[in-house]
Amino acid sequence: MTPSSRLLHICRRSASAAAAALWVLLFLSSQPRGAVASRDDDDRPNFIFILTEDMGFGDLACYGHPYAKTPNIDRLAAEGTSFVRFYVTGATCNPSRTGLMTSRHPASFPNYMDDFGLQNATTITDLLYAEGYSTGHMGKWHLGQENDPEQGTYSIEDIRIMSRSHNDPGGKDAVIFNSSIDFIEQHKDRPFYLNVWGHVAHSPVEPHPDLVREFCDVTVDRNDFGYWTQDKFADVDRLGGNVDDGMRHYLADLWGLDLQIGLLMDKLRELDLDKNTIVVFTSDHGAAPVMEDAQSLPTRMMGVMGGLRGAKHTFYEGGIRVPYIVRYPGHVPSGKVNHLSVISGFDLLPTIATLAKVKYDPLFFEGEDMSDVWLGSDRARTDPLFYSYSRTDGDRAMLYGKWKLHISKRDKRALYDLSVDREERNNVYDLVNTTRLALEESLHRWEESLPKNYCRLDERYEPCQGGIPLPYDPTIPPVKVGPPANVTYEAVSYESAAVLAPSSIMYTPIPTQSVDGTVRNA
């Protein structure tokens, strides 16, 4: 049974799911697609959402990497705002992408999205298409219906699913960016939204030799990198790899991506679209760990977390905190580094909808409108962020202000004060009783809202009973757990953190100039 037929089966067997499908149709039909206006009559911005894969918080030159060459991404940061505290919505590919597209927590879907798609949940492309935007998606999909999504899925008019390019001197994502430029040229005369979802820096890391030659002189000084990155170097040593060789290839992979971003931005300038196009750049989650049995060429997985603990698959900072750059000339401050505002991938949908002047009902989305933060405010996000896998026995985590709570599936508990311990090395769980109890109560309330069972086709997890998906009704608003009681929201201050913990590896991106070689933060 294909994913499409499985989803159809859900709608046939479940009254609630049938109602959900009807609600989506009514929602979109109640907002008839806006008339196709000429660019002269419509000044709404375009949106380009560049999503990389498995990129670490410290992988870019503008985010502190001592050897990376990413001049075009650095230029995005210099012409826009880079955010220090952006958090993805999941620790692996599909859950993260689900939260980005739907502004709903991936763990709230009872049927795993990679098997069954987004199950009639409204997406950002649904909202924009209904208001006259052209919509496109180039590159990796990982939103269900993986093999052959129909044109029009999630109201995306132009879907081109592309795997990585092989042995291309333009990098593994060259074909994706070529198609993206083609889409932009086709839709330059009307507002558009475009996903550009690449494969850098996912395994395998096999850049063209021309790209690798750019980094032939790189010799890794391990003192340039933080406490947790030493574990990655040790893993490479254990597998008989060469850290210098792995780093050169990994940086070459990033270099190829950067070249393509430069070409895309050149095209926007050529078409006189760059000043009215909002470009958002981020990653689906943190860098991948070195995994001998699950990767091709594992000793080249040299993504670094900028001093953060953890990696992809984990809810530590290194798994869910990634680079985030927003560029919108004349609106988003240029060269700014926002250290204070916690932003989530859930916030993408309501923020874009607001800037596109598209109406939406906040009741049905977990994200918050952070458009004022994009445009220069330093305010904090209101609600906490919660993390859980799509299973009933997995790890959980919660982030609120400076506090990060972890509860493992074996019920081991840890609490970190990120304002002085962004590396998550000092567990203060037993030292702040009132705060931890308040956080635990909030996390428990959120957990109570999650499905009591999950359906996945992978029988290693929680398989569907008899292969039959569970009912899901997106017309039921998600449960939102507000700020916990008895915890004072206190945004992280880099200055105070540096004074309180001078030995910690603190991050100071410098998007308007080259990285100071004395910075030790990768």
Image (cartoon, grey):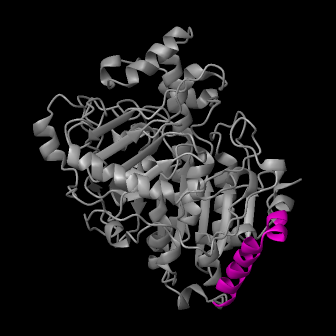
Q: Is residue 190 magenta?
A: no
* Residue 228 image point, x, y percent: 37, 25
User: Is 172 placed left or right of 56 in the picture?
Assistant: right
Residue 18: in magenta span: yes
Residue at x 31%, y 62% (from the top left corner): 483
Q: Quadrant of the C terminus?
A: top left
**Residue 36 in picture, x, y percent from top left:** 66, 88
Give the vertical position of 61 relative to 512 (above or below). Answer: above
* Quarter of the view holding residue 63: top left
Tell which residue pokes out farthest to the left in this image. 499
Q: Residue at x 26, y 60 (%)?
A: 485
The residue located at (19%, 58%) in the rendering is 488
Residue 423, position as x, y percentages in the image:
31, 33
- Residue 255 in sight in this render: yes
Q: Residue at x 21, y 58 (%)?
A: 486
Q: Is residue 222 left or right of residue 251?
A: left
Residue 95 at what x, y percent from top left? 59, 51
Q: Give the magenta range.
A: 8-30
Q: Is residue 385 left or right of residue 455?
A: left
